[in-house]
Image (cartoon, rainbow, N blue to C red):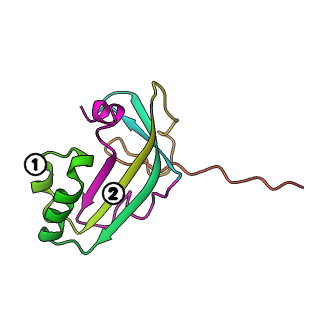
Amino acid sequence: MYLHLILAGRKRIEVRLSQNRVAPFGLVSPGDTIYFKARSGGFGARAAVASVDEIQNLTPPLVAMLFRRYNAFACGSAAFWRAKQIARFATLIHLADVRPISHGPAYRDSPGYSPRSSWIVLRRPSARRAS
């Protein structure tokens, strides 16, 4: 369902809320590319990161404020926001240049990969120096 919303341009912000400082907090930057997979399925979209808002020391009233301010662009369910009331960290990723895809990057050999992970950070190839 969320892939359809992303591809239709309705979901323009990816929201991640957590109790601990975990990925993607502190790991996503403007210009990065995010690949979206269907749950238990293949890749369906990719997007560029236009900007990132990171907030720490959240409280339930601040989570409620995030819901009011951003949910029109994040398309989260009321149940999602209720379950995240106790979050302390927020990562709001503003998406741009969304494109449908059928294949994504190889990621299963990436450091930190786990089949249960919802986020995998792929390292960028280091720039080669001209000699």
| The one of 120 and 71 positioned closer to us in this rendering | 71
| The one of 76 and 105 positioned closer to us in this rendering | 76
Identity, as a three-letter code, of the amino acid under mark 2: Leu
Residue 8, image x, y percentages: 32, 31
The residue carrying pointer 1 sits among few (fewer than 14), some (14 to 19) or many (20 or more) residues within 10 Å by Cα, namely: few
| The one of 87 and 15 positioned closer to us in this rendering | 15
Q: Which mark is residue 92?
A: 2
Task: Identify which residue is drawn at 24% across, 55% down.
Answer: 70
Asked which quadrant contains residue 93, the reply is bottom left
Viewport quadrant of the N terminus? top left
Task: Describe the element under mark 2 as helix, strand or loop.
Answer: strand
Asked which quadrant contains residue 24, the reply is bottom left
Tell me if residue 8 comes above or below residue 119 in the rendering: above
**In the displayed structure image, the side of residue 85 where residue 127 appears, left or right:** right
Task: Identify which residue is drawn at 32% across, 49% down.
Answer: 14
Residue 42, image x, y percentages: 38, 27
The CA span between labels 1 and 2 is 17 Å
Give the residues in magenta. 1-30
Task: Describe the element under mark 1 as helix, strand or loop.
Answer: helix
Q: Main secondary structure of the magenta part?
A: loop
Q: Which mark is residue 15?
A: none
Task: Identify which residue is drawn at 40% across, 47% down.
Answer: 95
Viewport quadrant of the C terminus? bottom right
Q: Which mark is residue 78?
A: 1
**In the displayed structure image, the side of residue 55 where residue 125 appears, left or right:** right
Number of numbered markers? 2
Residue 29, image x, y percentages: 49, 58
